[in-house]
Amino acid sequence: MNNEVELKLAVSAGFAAFLSQEISAFRILSQKTQFLANAYYDTPQYFFAARHMGLRVRQADGRFTFTLKTDGKTLGGLHIRPEYNIALDNAQPDLPTLVDTYQLAADWRDVTLQRIFSTDFERRCWLVECGNGVVVEIALDQGEIRAGDKCEPICEVEFELKQGRIKDLLHFVAALSLENGVRLSAASKAQRGYRLAGQKNTAVKNWSDSWREFLHAEAGAGNSQQKLTALFQLEQDLIEDTFALGADYFAADFVRTVERIGAFFNLYHYYTEHGALLESVLHARREKGQTTDDGQDALTAIAESNARLLSQLKTIIRRHSETKLNRPALETLFELLQSAPYVKRMLHLISLSLDDTEQYHHGENS
């Protein structure tokens, strides 16, 4: 069993050439291109999906691997989750052997599995040494998710930490000259596949209720770290929900557009009105020895970004109110959420939101 630690970006189709040029400045230990064919399985009742798990058979270079990805921790595009793997002789999943190998729940041996969806893509992969013993595997995936007659494109980059600490991974990605048209993605290929297959229909969430729930929970939160983590989780969920529903859904209705832009306004207004929250988190981390001298720089960058975002949201709201045109307002919002400065702001927030960066030290002996 391994703890997989990776950061994922959803990117534009033109990102590939930019990425290979960007990482050429680092020491590339190895690189390869391969085609990965993946079939995801579950019971007819979606037993594993209900428990936030994924069962996958992957074919690569003529070899088959059966993988169980379990529920872990997700902060923005940062994924930390246990993963179990066994080699297979063919493309048929072998759950009993996986159960026996890792001493998983014995009753899983007898469940009936069926194929739910597939993810097939080309992966361009670079193993990069970033300095100070930090090694990151960068994978550019381009292909498609297919469930029955429905199809959805894959275009994303995963940065997997092979050696070093999570803060090293965050610093590496933040230092890249990211172009616009990218965003942190918390949705795995499996989550997208289940949604495409119809197992997880995108529900329309009432974000006014979610905001009130956050304010109620915030009042009872024990410390500033818990408050920031809850706030970050709310933002992450709001972003994923916005992109899952899509601009067309909101543009079709004036009230939907107002409510969604208003949800982001509430978020950035809270950040700017509660600047002391970030200061308190940084102070607590310093007392525990969990941050370095660049913590203050990160905090300053977050504060400046939050103020800028609030100003941009005010402009979007004003123009939308004047013109009553939904599409231009939403296009501006979506562009903002997929901008390089927004990605780097989220990376700083992830760093502050982690309970203890050091406990996720990752390397050959971890």
Image (spheres, rainbow, N blue to C red):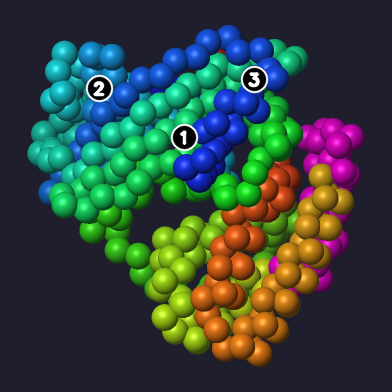
- Residue at 46 percent of width and 35 percent of height: 81
Chain part drawn in magenta: 268-297
Residue 225's spot in the image, x, y percent?
A: 72, 52
Residue 199's spot in the image, x, y percent?
A: 24, 57
Figure disc tally: 3
Secondary structure at badge 3 equals loop
- Report which residue position mark 3 lands on: 24
- Report which residue position mark 2 lands on: 59
Crowding near the residue tagged with mark 1, few <14, some 14–19, many ≥20 C-alpha atoms within 10 Å = some
- Residue at 61 percent of width and 78 percent of height: 262
Of tags 2 and 3, which is closer to the observer?
3
Does residue 298 appear to the left or right of 215 in the view shown?
A: right
Pick whichever, 279 or 328, lies toward us.
328
Q: CA distance from mark 2 to mark 3?
A: 29 Å
- Residue at 30 percent of width and 55 percent of height: 195
Label placed on residue 81: 1
Q: CA distance from mark 3 to mark 1?
A: 29 Å
Q: Quadrant of the N terminus?
A: top left
Q: Earlier in the sequence, mark 2 or mark 3?
A: 3
Residue 41's spot in the image, x, y percent?
A: 20, 38
* In the rendered image, the vertical position of residue 254 relative to residue 294, given as above or below: below
